[in-house]
Image: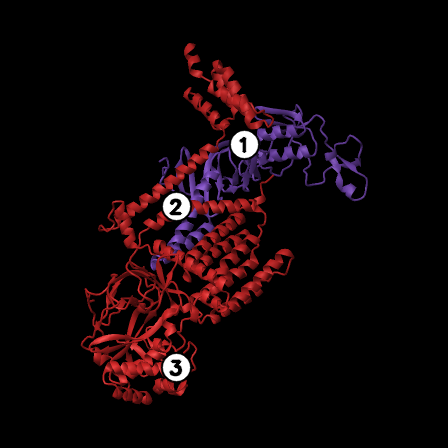
Amino acid sequence: MRVSLASAAVVKSAHEVWLPFGWKKRRYALRPTRYGLFFLAMLAALLIGSINHNNNFGYLLTFLLGGMVLVSLFHTFANLGGISLHPMACRPVFAGDTASVSFFLHAAADKVAIAGRIGQATSAPVDCITGAAASITIPVPTTRRGMLTIQSITLVTSFPLSLLEMRTTVPVTSQCLVYPKPLRSQLFATGHGDPDGDESPLPTAGETEFDELSPYRVGDDIRRAHWKSLAAGKELHTIRFEQTLTGGTMFSLALTPGEDIETKLGRLSYMIVTAESRALEYGLILDELTIGAGKGTAHREACLKALALY
Amino acid sequence: MIAKHHNKRPDPTAVLVGVVLCSVPHFLNISIVATLICLLLWSYQVLSLKRSLPVPGLLVRSVAGTVMFLIAVGLNEGLTLEAFVTLLIFMITVKTFELRTRRDQIVTIILCYFLIFSAMFFNDSFILFAYLLFTITCLTAGLISVSFAGLRPRRTMRLAGRLLLQAIPFMIVLFLFFPRMQSGLWGRPPVISQVSGFTDEVTFDSFANIAQSGKTAFRVTFDTEIPQPEQRYWRGIVLSRFDGRTWREDRHRPFARGVVNSEQEILRYTVTLEPHNHRTLFTLDLPFRIYSPRARLQADYTYQLWRPLSGRIQYEARSQPGASQRAGKTDVTANIGLPETGNSRVRALASQLRAESSSPVEFVQRTLFFFQNGDFTYSLNPAPIPADRISQDGIDAFIFDTREGFCEHFASAFAVMMRAGGVAARLVGGYMGGEMNPYGDYMVVRQSDAHVWCEVLIDGVWQRIDPTVAVAPGRALQNRAGTEVATGAGSLLNVQLPAFADFFSSFTNYTDMLNMRWNQWVLSYSRANQVELFRAIGIDIQLPGGVVLAVVVGGVLLVACGFIAIVLVRDIRTRDDDGATYWRRFCAVMKKEGLPKPAHQGPIEYGRDIVSRRPDLQNGVAKITALYSQLRYNPTCTEDTLPRFIEAVKSFRPSPKKRQR
């Protein structure tokens, strides 16, 4: 027989107790759901009653229902087997946000209501039809910047009776970039090619520190449009900053104030986001690494990635 | 895509159907008022499925729940089993008004399982079991469809049916091998509550216990010849003490040993007695042996259990219909007494009859003649005896005024007359009759066959006298179904539909036969059978300590689980298509070559990896990985992609090339 009790240790976390067992090289764990506990309590009452009355009719019903739960276990097991997972690209997030880690599910037979789980985060259950790919998305909360690497995910299902829940851990690698959480700050920057230049605070986003509004002309950056004036019934205006640095602004780790490196990175992250939203040209200097001035989504992501992996 | 459809709000119809299915068998057990309330509430539910009707709020539901609780208790004289079931049905019905969430629905379905199981407290027939199987399948389908709302109803039903069928081997194995205990964990109230026609005392005017029920009292299979109808007197209890109104059993009787008269014919038979909550067992007149460790023979040739019978029992017995029952030493004194006063006219009549007779035998004959010709009427609905005369002069009133009654009246009056005339007499309670079932070779004795007759002591021998037969000869020899509302068939016979009645009576006989087999083969399975079963496979479970038993049971269960697991594993394996199988074969080959596939790599990446390390395998590996990724990820791959892939894997031989190098 190839069933083996792989480990006597019961996997425990804060709220759950799972009964583990092994199958080939994969490990499975099992536990009743709350409905399952209710149901098993009912079965136990039925069994005790049958024993007390030595009632064969009661025994038949108890064993039939118990047998059905037992058989359903094998259906649950079959439902969880033969699934292959393929990670999907994961959109980077800022630390503290929820990363949507997605996988394609492939199965040789129809699967019902499979949910993915990473830590405590669980996806909505999906069906997997033979030949067609299904996808699960697990909302994983992030706390720290860097490369969030997922080594394995847990597949969970309670099909068919929803009384017993079985899970198995599937090794699959997925990575998600986590940018530093933006920390509100002024924009500290140096002019292009003038690393030793004066610190020149740039206006922050929350305040109205633009100098003037000029009527919108075709070709103006739409991100600098002053929507409020349009909403107020006037013409569309474009914001002109005092300090529109044509040569580009360089944000530098060395020049950013902050108690520790994380704070500094957070502020830099904020500066990059703000600069990009104002369509400024900006660059980044991180010790030896220098990213030249530029703008656009790709540039922004390159800068943020450099911060994340610093 | 289809990601969230299991989260959609499930349809409450499945739950409602489950509730109705589980409640229907209880309509026989709960009162009509409760049934009507349920029907009313369900109709409201069904209507609200079609158009939106106001859903009662929490306050209304609480008040309604309290009122229904009071109704349930009030209708059933306190907290009886019927009240419990009524309450459960009400509770579930109220619960159906709040089926908003999946949680509500699942909990309701689990309660429904509980409800349908409680039906076994009222009936344990084969038909109920079949109905339970059907209901369990429906409930399970409901549970699945509520939990996974995206599944089609047909699929849930099929799945539930498959679960049920696959569970049956488990049920059988567990049923056979689960250790049975001789006695329960604590006291056993009777499981099946049913109206018995038999009582262990006879009160002169009580009509309350006249059994009109066609329910089976017991079934008998005969190893020897079947006795003639006039011999079918099933002795139960002997009543010797009379207080002027009620006949009771004499509790201080010595135990006895049965005596066999070798010249007489012996009847061998097996009785399966339904639980009646008395200690009495029934045997044909006159028994001398019974094979049951729980029974003991009394001096008056009746058998009694140590405890009231709460579950069905089967026993083998021996009787000699022609044997004479010799009186014991104390029998005369115990069976002659009458209350000092009361029933003076009957006493006078008896004295007169005795004086006219030359012998006790003649006295008996004269008394019987009196009953035959005294304008007595056999009636199950006799005119009531005036309340002021019952306690003292009840027999007087019956014999001289009402002259209507049934077996209890005639037997009682006859015994009183015998005693008044100086002849020892007593009452015997039991059943008279029995009908052979044409579908199975056995006899059914019904509750409506309950009967009381007399025994008179003449020349030191107890003689059976049945005064009821003297009054109504037909009552004894006729099939009871024809004269009383005894069975379903009986009531239909009265409607004069002979063809349909024939069909109905054969239907009744057939289902009774099924129930008999069901009782015989399944419900009567006991520890003794279990011991035999284990002995047959070479294990003596009567060894000291239940260890052996525990080991065997555990082993059997494990083997059963393993068997199912293996069956299902094959199932899982065959589910891999050929593509996956051959891809795994390729990966296994490469693993042998020292290049196992890392779990995170896809086929193309893996192929590139291999080629970078083993350039000599370039052709084969590139072809295989390209074909495999086409098979897996390219929807436009043609029909011959798979065969080409399989061929590529089959012909892929890395090692020889390596050696050639």
Q: Quadrant of the C terminus of chain A?
A: top right
Q: Horizontally, is B512 left or right of B44 in the view?
A: left
Marks 1/2: CA–CA distance: 42 Å
Residue B376 is marked as 3
Marks 1/3: CA–CA distance: 97 Å
Residue at 27% in and 54% down: B528
Question: Can you give x and y, in whole percent of width and height, for residue B199 in the image?
Answer: 35, 72
Q: Nearer the viewer, mark 1 or mark 2?
A: 2
Task: Tell me the crowding category of disc 3: few under 14, some 14 to 19, or many 20 or more residues within 10 angstroms, Cα based.
Answer: many
Answer yes or no: do the residues labelled 2 and 3 have beta carbons within 8 Å?
no
Q: SS of the residue at dot 1?
A: strand
Q: Which residue is mark 2?
A: B169
Q: Is residue A282 above or below residue B611?
A: below
Q: Is residue B386 above or below residue B100?
A: below
Subunit that carries the residue with mark 1: A
Question: Can you give x and y, in whole percent of width and height, for residue B652 in the image?
Answer: 47, 18
Q: Which amino acid does the dot numbered 1 rest on?
A: Pro
Subunit that carries the residue with mark 3: B
Colour in which chain B is drawn: red
Q: Which amino acid does the dot numbered 2 rest on?
A: Pro
Q: SS of the residue at dot 3?
A: loop
Colour in which chain A is drawn: purple
In front here: B492 or A297?
B492
